[in-house]
Image: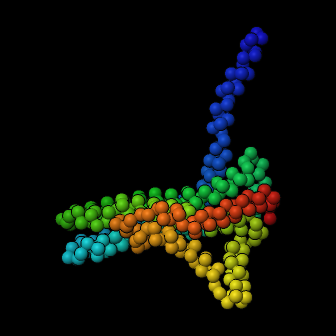
Amino acid sequence: MNTQSNTLPESFGSQGSAPAALSATRPFYWSVRRELWEYRSIYLAPLAVAGVILLGFVFVLIPLPQTMRAVSSLDAAHQRAALAQPYDFAAGLIMGAAFLVSIFYSLDTLYGERRDRSIWFWKSLPVSDLTTVLAKASIPLLVLPMVAFVITVVIQSIMLLLSSVVLLASGLSVATLWTQLELYQTLLGLLYHLVTVHMLWYAPIYAWLLLVSAWARRTPFLWAVLPPLAIDIFEKVAFHSSHFVALLEYRFSGGSEAVASMQGDFPIHPGMHLTPLNFLSSPGLWIGLVVFAAFLTAAVRLRRYQGPI
């Protein structure tokens, strides 16, 4: 009896060590799931834009046979420009929608839980402030770019399939369409753009918005805009320069390093030459990541001590 009673706790402890190790990432996983449950616009807004794109693409399909006959006499570059325009436009709209959702989500997520007083409930759970803020930061940095990419892949594939059906029904070949679009090379470039610009280059922008969301007691949008505006006015009055505005434009435009690394026109040209090493070695990237870490650390500390509004 004594032998059995002594061995039971040991076996129980050995079996429980593996789940304990696995549970280390569960708070982060469920925190991300919580954001997807609470903010359905994360995926509904890009999906709504995609639906509008498909509806508008019907008007492109109607004259498509005539368009194919008209572009057949053009050179390869002009053929690609004419045929790829709807696909490039679709990718740009979906990415733009995801970027706007990222902006408004970052401004509201930490402010909203203080406004509706749900912050006390979430703080009562065994989830640290660091885990919560990192989960919220992962939405604009990881989730939304990937949602935009997946939706773009699906939408452009549907558009290409519908175009092929219309051309085959009209007795035309689809070889020119498939050859000029080079859709999968374009999608690879789009993924590169999302990683370099939307995930890495825009990281300090999202961190600043999260910091404002954790600090502001009302109208976080104004508090996100007023400090940069005040700095700009002070610089113009005191030094008669606009370096700070130029810095903000440089960051919002994607930066010369990020754009030059793609060496092609936006959205993406399939024949472009990717140079990720030039982008990864640029000072603007690493300075932005340091600023991102500082803003995110401040947001974690603010959430730790802030209560409901």
Residue 6 position (above or below residue 150): above
- Residue 51 position, x and y percent, is 45, 65
- Residue 131 position, x and y percent, is 69, 51
What scheme was used to colour the molecule? rainbow
Determine if residue 293 is in view: yes
Q: Residue at x 63, y 82 (%)?
A: 243
Which residue sits furthest left?
A: 171
Residue 121 position (above or below residue 81): above
Quadrant containing the N terminus is: top right
Residue 54 position (above or below residue 127): below
- Residue 44 position, x and y percent, is 53, 61
Q: Nearer the viewer, residue 54 or 248?
A: 248
Determine if residue 63 is in view: no
Which quadrant holds residue 24?
top right
Q: Nearer the viewer, residue 228 or 106?
A: 228
Which quadrant holds residue 101?
bottom right
Q: Is residue 56 left or right of residue 80?
A: right
Q: Nearer the viewer, residue 198 or 56?
A: 198
Q: Residue at x 73, y 13 (%)?
A: 4
Q: Residue at x 73, y 88 (%)?
A: 238
Quadrant containing the C terminus is: bottom right
Q: Nearer the viewer, residue 69 or 47?
A: 69
Q: Residue at x 72, y 77 (%)?
A: 227
Number of disc labels:
0
Q: Is residue 276 left or right of residue 132?
A: left
- Residue 230 position, x and y percent, is 72, 81
